[in-house]
Image (cartoon, grey):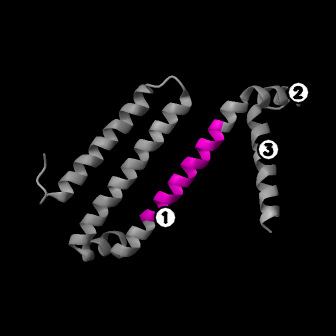
Amino acid sequence: LIDERLEEARTLVALLVSILFLSLQMATQPFRRSEDNWLATMAYLSLVVVYLTVLLLKMCEQDAEVCEDSFGLSPAELFSTFAFFGMGLLLLHLLLAALQLYLHDHSPRIIRLARAHSISPQTLVWRVLARKAASLCAFVR
């Protein structure tokens, strides 16, 4: 559809389409389960970050001075920054997805335990996570 010489335009169109689908996903919430809607939203957000990174790198590839003047970073530093941000976003996504699946599978038991201890289910979950994190830190040491 778009000529190969116009790489930035192709990336910009991909970015705009991803933003459109992210907006539609967030507005319509088409899936029955909230976990599925959340997963789709995070996937579209990841695509937006990737296309934005590619667009910035293509701009910096053409003129490194513009990149350094605009962002104060060399093209390599800009790539590293977005790569770390993208990996951090992906790891956060995976951790939250695992937590969501854990809570979904164990929600009746968590609700019963929370009622037995007269606390909210969220408080109980955070206490359990804090204990697991502490035991993991102790194990690593």
Would you say 128 lies left or right of 5 here? right
Magenta span of residues: 82-101
Q: Is residue 133 visible?
A: yes
- The secondary element bearing badge 2 is classed as helix
Q: Which mark is residue 13?
A: none
Label 1 crowd (10 A; few <14 / some 14-19 / many >=20):
few
Based on the picture, tell me whether residue 85 belongs to the magenta stretch.
yes
Q: Amino acid at mark 2?
A: Ala
Mark with earlier residue (1, 3): 1
Q: Position of residue 98 (x, y in %)?
A: 62, 43
Structural distance between the alpha carbons of marks 2 and 1: 43 Å
Residue at the spot x=82%, y=30% of the render? 114
Would you say 30 lies left or right of 4 here? right
Q: Answer above or below: position of 57 versus 35.
A: below
| Residue linked to disc 2 | 116
Residue at the spot x=56%, y=54% of the render? 91
- Give the camera-side residue of 119 and 103: 103
| Residue linked to disc 3 | 128
Q: Amino acid at mark 1?
A: Phe
Mark with earlier residue (2, 1): 1
Q: Position of residue 86 (x, y in %)?
A: 46, 58
Label 2 crowd (10 A; few <14 / some 14-19 / many >=20):
few
| Residue linked to disc 1 | 84
